[in-house]
Image (cartoon, rainbow, N blue to C red):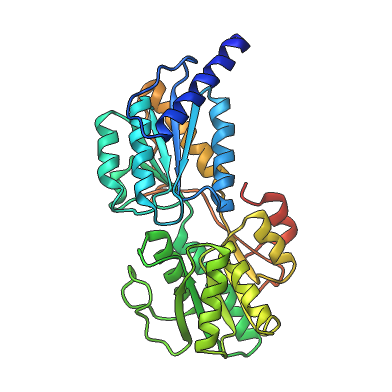
């Protein structure tokens, strides 16, 4: 067992390193705790999904006696902050890091540099481009997550004998894979023919009222929904990239006096989102498991540090599938789901 005084000093030294590197120093700090360093680099530090992911990584790092250093972009799409984070971790001499890339292509040269230092690189939630630029990817099957809420919405509208007019609230203009796959999966699940499966917005179906971007944020969701309702007041179904965007969309819908007329579906399965399912704000959401992603990622780096073992993908896929579960209190025939009570017990597990 380590001396608690030594551990405290080690944490103080580590804190000093964080401050030095945050101020732009490229020099590695002398570490006092003797623990291997692992990094976590998320898209932002404000989205509840990534906050939860961080908690999972912290818990597993403590269990593995690793020192976790965390970094984040200022907003979705902030590649430069993630590049700097990798530089910092290289200066630390980290054994590896987990990353949810803001720009799947632009981050690859920095990952290549990390590999030159024999670091293990694991993508979480969002693959890099090309996917094999990382050593492994632990993620939700985002296409399946979108497909599930599309299938649910299709069944609901068929049962209610309603013709859909759909607003698509996506992430941003960068075309990152998580954004594209969720969007295209939803359309597939709803039975709408897509054009190029790697591109958003090229479908040619009159049921699509339009696309707008949200940056995965509540404010963005509200603005995007306002824009699309102005364009087409007959919208009655809203796809959202994530639950913060869904919450913002609902505010716009409510302000327009259409809360009873419009169904919102989303992806995340966070505790606030599940609460919104129980309140009827969100009709159905696909639950992800970011704690599982982060814990498995940290564990993989711990094993790599010990004996060089690298993680393997789920058989038949080019990534490790961490699972997805549809959550709704309005179940539809032929679409397997759990209710919000189960969701509250398991949100983001």
Q: Is residue 13 above or below residue 102?
A: above
Residue 167 coordinates in the image, percent (x, y): 51, 80
Residue nearer the viewer, 332 or 137: 137
Residue 349 coordinates in the image, percent (x, y): 62, 46
Residue 126 coordinates in the image, percent (x, y): 41, 53
Taking the image as shown, residue 227 lies to the left or right of residue 204, namely right
Q: Is residue 35 above or below residue 94?
A: above
Residue 54 coordinates in the image, percent (x, y): 55, 41
Residue nearer the viewer, 317 or 284: 284
Residue nearer the viewer, 337 or 284: 284
Residue at figure coordinates x 49%, y 76% from the top left: 168
Residue 1 appears in the rendering: no
Residue 64 appears in the rendering: yes
Image-quadrant location for residue 117: top left
Residue at figure coordinates x 54%, y 62% from the top left: 217
Q: Is residue 235 above or below residue 179?
A: below
Image-quadrant location for residue 12: top right
Image-quadrant location for residue 184: bottom left
Residue at figure coordinates x 69%, y 65% from the top left: 276
């Amino acid at each position: 067992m380590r001396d608690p005084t030594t551990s405290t000093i080690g944490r103080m030294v580590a804190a000093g390193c964080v401050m030095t590197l945050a101020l732009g120093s490229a020099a590695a700090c002398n570490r006092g705790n003797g623990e291997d360093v692992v990094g976590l680099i998320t898209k932002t530090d404000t989205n509840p999904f990534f906050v939860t992911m961080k908690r999972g990584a912290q818990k597993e790092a403590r269990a593995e006696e690793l020192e976790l250093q965390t970094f984040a972009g200022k907003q979705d799409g902030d590649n430069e902050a993630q590049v700097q984070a990798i530089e910092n971790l290289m200066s630390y001499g980290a054994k590896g890091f987990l990353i949810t890339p803001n720009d799947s292509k632009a981050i690859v040269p920095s990952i290549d540099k990390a590999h030159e230092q024999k670091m293990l690189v694991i993508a979480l939630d969002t693959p890099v481009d090309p996917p094999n630029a990382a050593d492994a990817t632990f993620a939700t099957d985002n296409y399946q997550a979108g497909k599930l809420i599309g299938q649910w919405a299709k069944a609901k509208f068929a049962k209610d004998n309603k013709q859909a007019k759909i607003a698509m609230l996506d992430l941003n203009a960068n075309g990152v894979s998580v954004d594209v796959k969720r969007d295209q999966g939803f359309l597939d699940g709803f039975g709408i023919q897509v054009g190029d499966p790697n591109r958003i917005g090229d479908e040619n179906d009159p049921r699509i009222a339009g696309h707008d971007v949200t940056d995965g944020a509540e404010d963005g969701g509200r603005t995007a929904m306002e824009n699309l309702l102005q364009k087409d007041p007959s919208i009655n179904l809203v796809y959202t990239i994530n639950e913060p965007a869904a919450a913002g969309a609902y505010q716009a819908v409510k302000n327009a006096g259409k809360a009873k007329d419009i169904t919102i579906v989303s992806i995340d399965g966070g505790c606030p989102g599940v609460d919104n399912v129980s309140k009827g704000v969100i009709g159905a959401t696909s639950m992800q498991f970011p704690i599982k992603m982060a814990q498995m990622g940290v564990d993989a780096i711990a094993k790599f540090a010990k004996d060089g073992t690298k993680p393997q993908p789920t058989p038949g896929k080019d990534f490790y599938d961490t699972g997805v579960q549809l959550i709704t209190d309005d179940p539809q025939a032929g679409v397997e789901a759990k209710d919000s009570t189960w969701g509250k017990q398991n949100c983001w597990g």
